[in-house]
Image (spheres, rainbow, N blue to C red):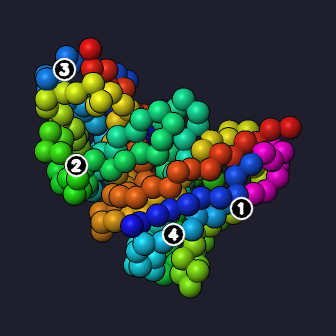
Amino acid sequence: QSVLTQPPSVSAAPGQRVTISCSGSSSNIGNNYVSWYQQFPGTAPKLLIYDNNNRPSGIPDRFSGSKSGSSATLGITGLLTGDEADYYCGTWDYSLTAGVFGGGTKLTVL
Amino acid sequence: EVQLVESGGGLVQPGGSLRLSCAASGFTFSSNWMSWVRQVSGKGLEWVANIKEDGSEKYYVDSVKGRFTISRDNAKNSLHLQMNSLRAEDTAVYYCARSGYNSGGLDYWGQGTLVTVSS
């Protein structure tokens, strides 16, 4: 049972927009920055979004992040079949004094 | 180019020990927090531990407290995870990762090293 809650799966058609939610509490998302990661099978995760809504260099602006209260959202527009991957949110939890991740969301581009 | 290369994984019996290493290059190692993250095959990411730039602060997930020790050698640009009293549930791919931002976002990851705890 992950500290951060994500939907197990989401799906959408190529070219469409999808959002992935990440729900936490005041001890984590509510009082800290959120990061998002993309992971393809058999490879290491890759940072997509940091500090709630910032993209590292090289990440296309089709990817966006937002945060409201104790929840965060990853948005992906103009979906490509190559976006099919697992997506994870992550942050720090002040009560646990530990990093925490969501359980991950598998994106299917139909 | 930032590179993180893990080593030290392998097969170990329950109750045994293993020391993972992560060789860092391409950046000023002593300027970044570093973390270990693990992933059981087919499951999600689990944060394991992290360590401050100078090694003065260390944090662990509850399930490894008292068994795992994170350390770093800034002179050798290396990160380590000493794992003792290993259990079957510690079986996973272990990644080392760099915190590239003050907020803790992990911007570079190694390729991972597999630890298998089994008799």
Q: Could you say which disc has been placed on residue A88 in the image? A: none
Q: Are marks 4 and 2 on the same chain?
A: no
Q: Residue A24: x and y, percent?
A: 31, 41
Q: Residue A55: x and y, percent?
A: 20, 53
Q: Are marks 1 and 2 on the same chain?
A: no
Q: Residue A8: x and y, percent?
A: 37, 24
Neighbor class of circle 4 (other Cα within 10 Å; few <14, some 14-19, many 20+) is: many
Q: Which amino acid does the dot numbered 3 rest on?
A: Pro
Confirm or deny contact between disc 3 and disc 2 (CB under 8 A): no
Question: Label 2 is found on which chain of the structure?
Answer: A
Neighbor class of circle 1 (other Cα within 10 Å; few <14, some 14-19, many 20+) is: some
Which is more N-terminal, label 1 or label 4? Answer: 1
Neighbor class of circle 2 (other Cα within 10 Å; few <14, some 14-19, many 20+) is: some
Q: Is residue A46 left or right of residue A75?
A: right
Residue B12 counted in the magenta span: yes
The relative height of residue A2 versus residue A106 in the rendered view (above or below) is below
Q: Give the labeled residue for mark 1.
A: B19
* Residue that appears at 57% across and 73% down: B78
Label 3 to label 2, Cα distance in Å?
19 Å
Q: Which amino acid does the dot numbered 4 rest on?
A: Ala
Q: Which amino acid does the dot numbered 1 rest on?
A: Arg
Q: Give the labeled residue for mark 3.
A: A14
Q: Is residue B19 visible?
A: yes
Q: Give the labeled residue for mark 2.
A: A59
Label 1 to label 3, Cα distance in Å?
45 Å
Q: Could you say which disc has been placed on residue B24 in the image? A: 4
Magenta range is B11-18
